Image (cartoon, helix red, strand yellow):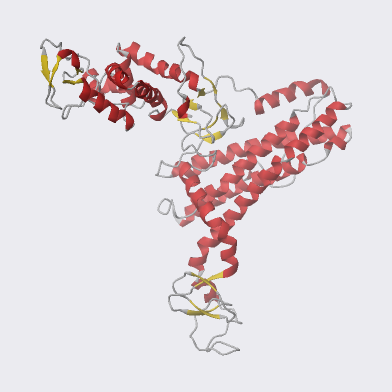
């Protein structure tokens, strides 16, 4: 069975090997590059206010070139299909050009009136207007400019400017954005700017591949992912977040698990210790009861009296010494069975809550360790170790922080994975026990090695002799590799053995990355024209 997990549980769990000084620098550099190497070309991009137009132009140009469309029609098409260029192309192949345009409200044949009439009756206000005071759209419907302007104004103020349909009854044609802009700007230039901003922001608001960075205060950046949307990313402002739910990074928890845990943790955990210390379960209705007097005979609001000492149901008769027909000095098996179902879930939650809280506190405490390690590294570099490379120190600290964070979120995952709230009918009790044992074996191996690494990094190695510093270095580097492999195996277990076997496909986690959360790179502006969003948004 040890081969299945890759590592044993003894103190010799990891191997430490020394290499000659001649090869030391080369191998050390390779290991560090593997651990924290440069990202190169990343699969996610930072879209700043200045590059938003360029980002939108990329997708617009692709559709315009492939389908020979004007920009306004390409934008209408992309907004309808959530800015998914691949979706547009697949619909084009599957349904054909005519049906695709019809569903998106794009009219390729311009049916606008040529205004040969000198007077045109508006079917909205029923007044007659000169032809030059009316406007027709591609669908051929023509109304007076005042009615169009009022209609467009309402739509823009209601935030519906991305897809403004024709005013005619049951007409789903999308109005030409240029005509909207001209009519609105003639009355209110600021409203026209608002319209343009909404069109620009639609690239983010309606795009499944792009999301605003959830930083507070808002940094003004958005992130675009090129491949898997189930990922965790780091914005240029430094904030790391889950791209799927815009929450903090939380793998190996799925988004739903993390949302449920976060809600439960904030709502219940502040009082869980008090509840366990000051309340007892009613043996009849299983509600929590608080004792507000000195007598050990208490009564629930349901009317059931019971003994505060043992929790057993009793009658009302009692004196200063005892409760009639009741003895709780003798242990009976049924005492534990009666309230087991009521207490089980609270105790179970308390178990995972305490572990989650302990690793949270360790993560906070170890954040202060970073400053100590920097000081010790400087001390070594200023002495006789000046020519040595001490990047193994920050690398080891990074591995500690990263793996501690994974451990932290593995407990909410276990709480929901092996509970019955989400997967009641997905596993038998036997299957649940087997999978829980498999997961906890991996989890505990990771936890033991993380604690070892924490102890090693806390050692005052700046005061050590040269040989002891080299020994500490080898231990930290080897242990970092072991922990990295254990993290990979834990994620593999979750993805394949646990979540992969479920019928429900809603629990998808971000994949494990040895180098950590992916840092989004800057989106290069390949278009000469740039624009900035109005500052009022930000």
Residue 527 as seen in the image, left or right of residue 28: left
Instruction: Say if 332 sits above or below 267 in the image.
Output: below
Relative to residue 490, is residue 392 drawn left or right? right
Number of callouts: 0
| Residue at screen point 57% across, 77% down | 310
Q: Quadrant of residue 111?
A: top left
Tell me which corner region of the image, top left, top right, bottom left or bottom right, holds residue 28. top right
Q: Is residue 206 left or right of residue 137?
A: right
Residue 173 in view of the camera: no
Q: Residue at x 71, y 36 (%)?
A: 397
Residue 24 coordinates in the image, percent (x, y): 79, 24
Is 173 rendered above or below residue 408? above
Residue drawn 28% across the image and 30% down it: 154
Asked whether, in this view, residue 235 is left or right of residue 113, the answer is right
Which x, y percent locates residue 405?
Answer: 61, 41
Whole-percent x, y for residue 126 in the image? 11, 26
Q: Give the quarter of the image for residue 186.
A: top left
Q: Is residue 348 visible?
A: yes
Q: Closest to the observer: 313 or 149? A: 149
Residue closer to the observer: 385 or 269: 269
Q: Position of residue 63 (x, y in %)?
A: 34, 16
């Amino acid at each position: 069975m040890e081969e299945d997990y890759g590592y044993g549980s003894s103190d010799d769990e990891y191997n430490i090997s020394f290499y000659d000084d001649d090869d030391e620098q080369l191998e050390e550099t390779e290991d560090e590059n593997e651990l924290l190497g440069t990202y190169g070309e990343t699969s996610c991009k930072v879209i700043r206010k200045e590059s938003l137009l360029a980002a939108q132009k990329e997708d617009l140009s692709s559709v315009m070139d492939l389908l020979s469309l004007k920009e306004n029609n390409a934008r209408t098409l992309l907004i309808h299909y959530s800015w998914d260029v691949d979706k547009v192309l697949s619909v084009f192949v599957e349904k054909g050009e005519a049906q695709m345009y019809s569903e998106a409200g794009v009219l390729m044949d311009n049916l606008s009136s040529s205004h040969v009439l000198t007077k045109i009756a508006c079917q909205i206000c029923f007044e007659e207007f000169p032809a030059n005071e009316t406007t027709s759209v591609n669908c051929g419907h023509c109304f007076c400019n005042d009615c169009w302007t009022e209609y467009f104004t309402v739509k823009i103020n209601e935030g519906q400017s991305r897809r403004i349909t024709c005013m005619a009854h049951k007409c789903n044609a999308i109005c030409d954005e240029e005509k909207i802009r001209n009519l609105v700007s003639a009355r209110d230039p600021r409203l026209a700017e608002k319209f343009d901003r909404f069109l620009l922001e639609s690239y983010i608001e309606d795009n499944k591949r792009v999301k605003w960075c959830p930083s507070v205060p808002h940094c003004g950046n958005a992130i675009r992912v090129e491949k898997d949307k189930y990922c965790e990313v780091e914005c240029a402002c430094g904030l790391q977040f889950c791209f799927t739910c815009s929450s903090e990074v939380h793998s190996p928890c799925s988004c739903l698990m993390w949302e449920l845990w976060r809600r439960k943790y904030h709502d219940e955990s502040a009082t869980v210790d008090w509840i366990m210390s000051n309340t007892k379960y009613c043996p009849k209705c299983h509600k929590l009861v608080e004792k507000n007097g000195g007598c050990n005979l208490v009564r629930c609001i349901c009317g059931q009296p019971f003994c505060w000492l043992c929790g057993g149901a009793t009658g009302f008769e009692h004196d200063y010494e005892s409760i009639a027909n009741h003895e709780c000095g003798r242990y009976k098996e049924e005492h534990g069975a009666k309230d087991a179902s009521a207490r089980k879930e609270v105790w179970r939650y308390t178990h995972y809550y305490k572990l989650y809280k302990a690793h949270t506190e360790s993560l906070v405490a170890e954040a202060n360790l970073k400053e100590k390690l920097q000081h010790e590294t400087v001390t070594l570099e200023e002495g006789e170790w000046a020519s040595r490379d001490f990047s193994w120190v920050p690398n080891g600290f990074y591995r500690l922080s990263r793996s501690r964070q994974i451990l932290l979120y593995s407990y909410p995952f276990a709480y929901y994975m092996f509970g019955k709230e989400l997967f009641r009918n997905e596993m038998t009790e036997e299957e649940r026990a087997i999978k829980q044992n498999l997961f906890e074996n991996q989890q505990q191996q990771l936890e033991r090695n993380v604690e070892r690494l924490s102890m090693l990094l806390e050692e005052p190695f700046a005061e050590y002799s040269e040989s002891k510093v080299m020994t500490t270095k080898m231990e930290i580097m080897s242990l970092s590799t072991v922990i990295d492999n254990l993290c990979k195996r834990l994620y593999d277990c979750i993805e394949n053995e646990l979540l992969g076997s479920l019928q429900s496909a809603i629990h998808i986690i971000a994949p494990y990355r040895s180098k950590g959360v992916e840092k989004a790179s800057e989106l290069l502006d390949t278009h000469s024209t740039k624009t900035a969003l109005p500052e009022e948004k930000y």
